[in-house]
């Protein structure tokens, strides 16, 4: 299914891997020290602070042209950006403080609630990419205000119920879920576009600011170089160990997420998507190609490879998916086809979610984040003591 061959240890090789490299570590001690300071500050002080309290205004360092270019890249790389964000959504479930809040709100613990919650998330993200940031009356600003208000309500309610508030640390780690894998893993799909990385991380720095993240905790820095060091250290020291030692609650919530979104995309599976996520986070045993190791690391011949523990269907999805994005996505005609498929799925999800209609009924299958007049739909929260 791929153009690789299996070695004695079962690891996949590829003749096309010559141009591929593992995620680079920060390239000097100064950057490394700054990244360490950022992470220590985020985990220690960021866990004690909630929303920044800033006004819903663009930050002074906002670059409109860079932001618009980032919005344009979403059309160019829609398929892989969606895939990266899905892996990010799974990864945040491995963070205990975020998982507690999600469990408290009861918005994503069953296939039905997860379907509605994550389709809303998809629609909100699309509204940020597809609407004008310059027009204060656009759906961009309506969506941002609605999400920030929902965070405030959830944080206050969960704090009262002993699940903890949504902190700066949680917001920044969630921000990684939307931006981390597609930027740090761009080289894995032969995406060597530095302007894409610069623009996209700037856009998410702006989004983080608007959603209540202080600059000192924002995982996206002043430029791609600073963003890269922050993203890299968070992946190495937060997400990699968290995903290496996942809990039963993580698997239960991930199962609900994938089973919910299966009604949007029937090619999703729990086993395959967890494999994709752990591979992107460089968890040992989840390598597929020989170049999946970090720079300077060598394969341990005794390392168990979890690909061979997957069910046959999951293995087929992993092999097909990784071959497509690793070796074919670089061609414009392939990107066009993959992006068209995502666009069609999004269209059906909005206008005719037929699988969800069959499973959940007409009323529940249709998800809307805006009312007919353009104002935001309110989030409904269901708490354990309701």
Image (cartoon, grey):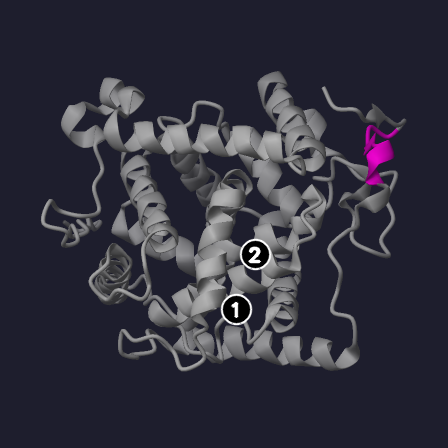
Please provide percent x and percent y for residue 117.
30, 43
User: Which mark, by number, is residue 144?
Assistant: none
Q: Residue at x 14, y 29 (%)?
A: 363
Q: The residue tagged with tag 1: helix, strand or loop?
A: loop
* Residue 170 painted magenta: no
Up-down relation of residue 13 to residue 369 (above or below): above
Q: Nearer the viewer, residue 137 or 159?
A: 137
Label whose residue precedes the other's in the sequence (1 or 2):
2
Q: Residue at x 24, y 63 (%)?
A: 145
Please provide percent x and percent y for residue 168.
41, 72
- Is residue 34 something one can see in this rendering? yes
Q: Nearer the viewer, residue 135 or 339?
A: 135
Q: Is residue 197 left or right of residue 5?
A: left
Image quadrant containing the N terminus: top right
Q: Residue 292 occupies which quadrant of the picture?
A: top right
Residues in magenta, as a range: 9-17
Q: Residue at x 63, y 28 (%)?
A: 318
Please provide percent x and percent y for residue 123.
31, 45
Q: Residue at x 70, y 80 (%)?
A: 33
Please provide percent x and percent y for residue 293.
79, 48
Q: Is residue 50 left or right of residue 20?
A: left
Q: Is residue 355 left or right of residue 80?
A: left
User: Which mark, by number, is residue 180?
Assistant: 2
User: Which mark, by number, is residue 219?
Assistant: 1
Q: Residue 367 occupies which quadrant of the picture?
A: top left
Q: Nearer the viewer, residue 186 or 300?
A: 186
Q: Are marks 1 and 2 in contact (CB under 8 Å)?
A: yes
> From mark 1 to mark 2, how far is it between C-alphas?
9 Å
């Amino acid at each position: 299914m791929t153009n690789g061959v299996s070695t004695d240890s079962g690891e996949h090789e590829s003749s096309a891997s010559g141009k591929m490299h593992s995620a680079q570590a920060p390239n000097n001690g100064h950057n490394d020290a700054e990244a360490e300071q950022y992470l220590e500050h985020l985990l220690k002080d960021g866990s004690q602070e909630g929303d920044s309290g800033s006004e819903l205004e663009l930050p002074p360092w906002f670059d409109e042209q860079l932001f618009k270019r980032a919005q344009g890249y979403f059309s160019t790389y829609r398929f892989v950006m969606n895939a990266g964000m899905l892996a990010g959504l799974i990864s945040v479930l491995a963070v205990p403080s975020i998982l507690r809040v999600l469990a408290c709100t009861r918005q994503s613990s069953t296939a039905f609630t997860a379907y509605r919650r994550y389709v809303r998330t998809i629609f909100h993200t699309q509204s940020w990419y597809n609407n004008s940031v310059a027009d204060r009356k656009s759906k961009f600003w309506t969506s941002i205000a609605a999400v920030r208000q929902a965070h405030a309500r959830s944080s206050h309610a969960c704090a009262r119920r002993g699940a903890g508030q949504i902190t700066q640390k949680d917001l920044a780690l969630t921000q990684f879920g939307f931006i981390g894998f597609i930027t740090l893993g761009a080289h894995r799909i032969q995406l060597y576009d530095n302007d894409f990385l610069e623009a996209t991380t700037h856009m998410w720095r702006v989004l983080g600011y608007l959603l209540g993240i202080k600059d000192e905790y924002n995982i996206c820095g002043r430029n791609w170089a600073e963003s890269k060091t922050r993203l890299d250290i968070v992946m190495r020291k937060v997400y990699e160990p968290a995903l290496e030692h996942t809990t039963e609650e993580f698997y239960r919530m991930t199962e609900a997420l994938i089973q919910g979104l299966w009604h949007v995309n029937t090619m999703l599976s729990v086993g395959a998507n967890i494999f994709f996520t752990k591979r992107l986070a460089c968890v040992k045993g989840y390598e597929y190609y020989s170049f999946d190791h970090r720079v300077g690391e060598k394969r341990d011949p005794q390392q168990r490879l979890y690909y061979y523990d997957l069910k046959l269907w999951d293995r087929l999805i992993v092999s097909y998916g990784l071959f497509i994005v690793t070796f074919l996505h670089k061609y414009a005609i392939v990107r066009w086809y993959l992006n068209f498929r995502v666009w069609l799925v999004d269209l059906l999800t909005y206008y005719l979610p037929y699988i969800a209609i069959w499973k959940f009924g007409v009323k529940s299958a249709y998800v809307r984040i805006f009312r007919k007049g353009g104002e935001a739909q309110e989030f409904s929260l269901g708490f354990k003591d309701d």
